[in-house]
Image: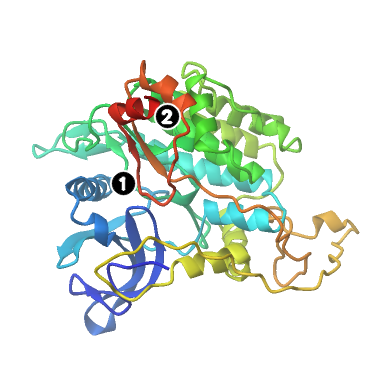
Amino acid sequence: MHHAVSRPGDVIGGRYRLIELAGAGGMAEVWRAELEGIEGFRRTVAVKRILKHLSVSKEHRQMFVQEAKLTATLDHPNIVHVYDFGEDNAGLFLVLEWVEGLTARDLIQLLNEYGQKPSAALATAIGIEVLKGLEAAHENSITLEDGTEQNAPIIHRDVSPSNVLLSVRGVTKLADFGLARAMHSSISSMTPAGIVKGKLAYMAPEILRGKPASGQTDVYSTGVLLWELLSCKRLFQGEGEVITALMQNKRPASIASHRPDLPAALSAAVDRALDPDVETRFKSAGEFARALSDVLRTVPERTDRARLAKEMRNALVYWKKSAAGQRAAQERAIAPATDAIPAPKPVAPAKPTATPAAKPEEAPGGDASKIFLDLSLSGIPLQGRTTSPPRVEEKRVEEPSAISLELDLETAVPLVETLPIDFDASEASVTFELASIKKKAE
């Protein structure tokens, strides 16, 4: 149950009418809304607002302003566009492109529920589009007042399944530049020196050693994303395992150990992206994207926009019927407005409606394993074809919360590795100060 800043029907900025809550994270909520213009003009947009209890925080306000400024400088089909930025009595709001579809996190949960994994071509095509968006951000430039162009690279720093949007139009879009860092003077990062922000499970190992974020750190995060999309499993189980692996420069298990059916070139590309040594890792998002494009040339399946659109439209239908989709809808439910915000209560998973198992149709040629389209989600039917019911016993796959670490790397890291620190997933961010860690040690 979510305590929303706004309510359905509210008009934001004088022209954005809120329709329904689309999602809420640790820092903000996102609404599906309509831009209302003259002569009955309508356009669906997304309105993003800081959560009520964070709206008074100077730091969160600065982060929100920075997200608006950074995203406004980007114009690429694989990055969510920003349309407007404003403030009303309830605080700041950001108006973004509305993307109808699923997040990569939704897709992983859906496939996991059905006991399936995506095809190599589908995952590779998604990865390429994420990397194209990152490449555009890393090569970003801005026009100065005197008309000259200045390089203005933007490092996303939060590439994770929940920030990858899979559109029913067949386009993958990178969202949420709330933690992005501008590598130029005009829009500086709001992150204080010594603070590491981002989802720990998707963070490159050099970040925890005090190295600055770079294009290669986003490459590593995209490698984690692809590993999890292909395997439908978490790369690291728990934050303690993450910290140990990163600080020891431990190379993650090859994706081939979970998906021996993948093309060798794809497994090699994902493994290289996850190399803890930046000298061995792909040098840029563009280089990683080109390696994945070479993989697609060896795979017979089509990956055009029409095919991907059909896959995502089908997946969206089944997401709404799935236990994960119903659970997400419950979590978006809006509680009555109140000034005092109680601690969130856990929501019991929705029980999926039992459906009788059905025998798969046999495809032309008699091979029942080929009954779905080339880029199908394997166990999820297309155009009314039947399949086995969801495997409801599958363990729910959770994405880690955003974690902020404040570390004196020589002193604090050994303590972090040995102390039983409790990472509270309900918080937007957690800051571990060296003094408090020492106190626990005593």
User: Badge 2 local density, few (<14 within 10 Å), some, or many (20+)?
Assistant: many
What amino acid type should be assigned to the residue bearing mark 2? Thr
Q: Camera-side residue: 243 or 46?
A: 243
Image coordinates for residue 250, horizontal then vertical, percent: 56, 21
Which mark, residue 178? 1
**Occupied quadrant, residue 9:** bottom left
The label shown at residue 150 is none
Q: Can you give x and y, in whole percent of width and height, for residue 331 in the image?
A: 47, 66
Please identify the residue farthest to the bottom as the structure is shown. 39
Q: Nearer the viewer, residue 350 or 423?
A: 423
Q: Residue furthest left?
A: 146
Instruction: Judge from the rendering whether residue 166 lies leftward or rightward of residue 375; answer left or right.
Output: left
User: Where does the image place residue 347, in percent across and percent down from the top left?
Assistant: 51, 65
Count neighbours of disc 1 (C-alpha within 10 A) and say few if under 14, some if 14 to 19, many if 20 or more. many
Residue 51 vs 161, above or below: the answer is below
Q: In which quarter of the image is the C terminus?
A: top left
- Nearer to the camera, 99 or 17: 17
As measured in the structure, the alpha-carbon distance from the residue carrying label 2 to the one carrying label 1 is 16 Å
Q: Circle 1 — which element? A: loop
Image: 264 above or below 167:
above
The disc, 2 or 1, on the residue closer to the chain's N-terminal end is 1
**Marks 1 and 2: in contact by CB < 8 Å?**
no
**Residue visible at 75% across and 35% down?**
260
Q: Name the residue under label 2.
A: 217
